[in-house]
Image (tube, rainbow, N blue to C red):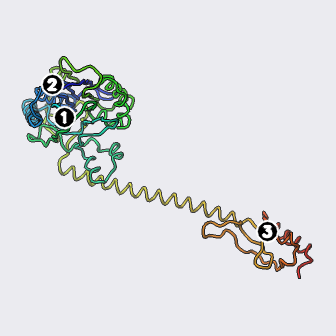
Amino acid sequence: MVFEGSSAALSHTGKVRSNNQDSGYAGSNLFVVADGMGGHAGGDVASSLAISRIEDLDRAYNTTAEAERALQDAVSDAAHDLIATVKARPELAGMGTTVSALIMVDDYAVIAHIGDSRIYLFRDGALTQITTDHTFVQRLVDSGRITPEEARYHPRRSVLMRVLGDMDPDPEIDTFIMPTQPGDRWLLCSDGLSGVVDDTHTSKAMALGLAPGRTADLLLKQALDGGAPDNVTIVIVDVGGQHPKFSGTPTIVGSASNPRGVEVPAARAGRAGWLHAARVAANEPTHFEPAPEFLEELIEEDKRRARRRRIGWVVGLVVVLAAFAAGLFAAYEWTQTRYFVGADKDTVVIFRGIQQDLGPISLSSVYEDTNLRLDSLSEFDRETVEGTIPASSLPEAQKIVDRLKSVSGGGR
């Protein structure tokens, strides 16, 4: 049956890129985000071709299995379209695109995914990432070598391990089926959003209960406030809910909204580059898929980074411990400039240090046993000595002892 709910799609160039290589689609049953790559025009063409091939799936399905097969076939066909396009137009060599697509079938969401665009589910106040990034850093996270937080700032965070491109006619696509329910909010986005706005802020925006269009506007503003170094594409789908049901024509955003307007620079004559013959890229691509030997180099580089990070932690710890030890030593040295008069068994003693202990370490020691017996003192003086009498210096401590001797008659 036709999906009942509301949706919105928007796409923005961002603050750094000169053109928008993303594409998005929000229809009656089908919702897609594609993040193109491969130079100024290549990315535009790749994401547009993907949307053009997949948008034919926007219809009702009898079963989820039927929808899943249709998605698999359409994404594979899109890969063949990319290969055919590059053969006809070699100046586009190296282009590719991510694809994150969702078809609503009754009470289920049928999902197809390749690349690092994402699909999230917001349910009962919790935001969950449904798709897994096909990136180099995600492999490092999965293997426990870095944390998810470290992955957000890793210098190789944009290296894709899987992508819909012009080199692989049989791409490995993740497909799966999930139950959905009234009140669910689905978010499809390119990494222009997920790479800038963290899950906490995304969840807060989704939780406000605003209409899909206003929610998408709020998320876009957060991405722009965060610098928006890449194109930002957002598709939000509400299952049921209080907002008006979707009706009318599909919403197509980004480069796919005007695919015929994409102008491809002519191939330069002369010597070809080492990557692809006659490739022209006005902008550096935001993603690329590494060759196996380069992947090994990346892994080795990551190992070196990990070793340097460990060495940095060890050096930092040593510096902190050394500073702490120096502070303790300085404090101990200061205590040894202080004196006090006290009792040791049956005589008056001058102690060096202060009347405290640091764990098992005593901060005082006997400096001089005066041989002045405690029983020669008055009861008041004896109790005072046993309670200790502080002195700021050795001469002051000796004066205290001399006074005790004078009032006791010099001892017995």
What amino acid does circle 3 point to?
Leu
Give me the disc on residue 2.
2
Name the mark nearer the viewer: 3 or 2.
2
Relative depth, front residue between 100 and 61:
61
Relative depth, front residue between 100 and 287:
100
What amino acid does circle 1 point to?
Ala
> How busy is the neighbourhood of tag 1: few (under 14 within 10 Å), some, or many (20 plus)?
many
Q: Quadrant of the N terminus?
A: top left
Task: Give above or below for 120 relative to 404.
Answer: above
Question: What residue is shown with label 1?
Answer: 109
Q: Quadrant of the C terminus?
A: bottom right
The CA span between labels 1 and 2 is 13 Å
Give me the disc on residue 25.
none
Q: Is residue 96 left or right of residue 10?
A: left
Q: Is residue 132 in sight in this rendering?
A: yes
SS assignment at label 1: strand
Residue 283, position in %: x, y? 25, 31
Give me the disc on residue 394.
3
Tag 1–tag 2 contact (CB < 8 Å) = no
Task: Give above or below for 101 relative to 327.
Answer: above
Q: Earlier in the sequence, mark 3 or mark 2?
A: 2
> How busy is the neighbourhood of tag 3: few (under 14 within 10 Å), some, or many (20 plus)?
some
Relative depth, front residue between 29 and 191:
29
Question: In the picture, residue 214 is in which quadrant?
Answer: top left
What amino acid does circle 2 point to?
Val
The CA span between labels 1 and 3 is 85 Å
